[in-house]
Image (cartoon, rainbow, N blue to C red):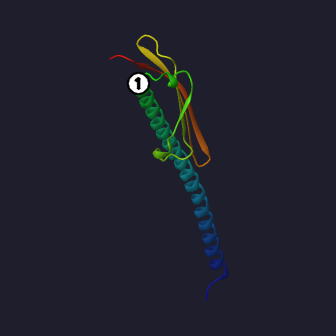
Amino acid sequence: MKHPQQNGFVLILVVVAIALIGAEMIVLTSSANKILFQSDTAYLQACERNLVTSGLAWAKRNIKNEGKETFDRPIGLDVSSMSIHGATLSVNIVTPKDEEAEVQINTSCTHERRTLRHNDKYRIRLKH
């Protein structure tokens, strides 16, 4: 015959074990959310670098072609083939002076609910 005190002790152990498992789940969920946030940030930064590099390559090619219609106005480039969700890329080439040109590149890319925007100016050497 079991004593009622033993059954109560086992029940307390079970309740404590369930509480500890619940607390561990909260800690693990928090850690998983931090890792997910960091991986989303890394993905967006990689997409941003790809867009900037593509914009610079396009600008170098079009500066050499010397098409006056591409200078001093922002041009939106089609980046749909890059498979970056919610991505935009615009390039504004300032009329080249001396041996370099200034290029303004604006990018935007979205992943889930986060959007990363990049606006910066670059200098491109015209002669090697």
Q: Quadrant of the C terminus?
A: top left
Residue 32: percent from the left, percent from the top?
A: 54, 53
Residue at the image position 39 percent from the left and 23 percent from the top: 64
- Judge whether 47 appears above or below 12 on screen: above
Residue 66 in picture, x, y percent from top left: 43, 21
Looking at this rendering, what residue extends furthest in the bottom direction?
1
- Which is more toward the observer, 37 or 94? 94
Q: Is residue 16 above or below residue 6?
A: above
Q: Which of the 4 quarters of the picture holds residue 107?
A: top right
Task: Read off the residue under disc 1.
Answer: 65
Q: Position of residue 23 (x, y in %)?
A: 61, 59
Q: Nearer the viewer, residue 107 or 12?
A: 107
Nearer to me, 15 or 33: 33
Q: Is residue 99 left or right of residue 85?
A: left
- Which image quadrant: the N terminus? bottom right
Tell me the kind of residue under disc 1. Answer: Asn
Query: Is 86 displayed left or right of 50 in the figure?
Result: right
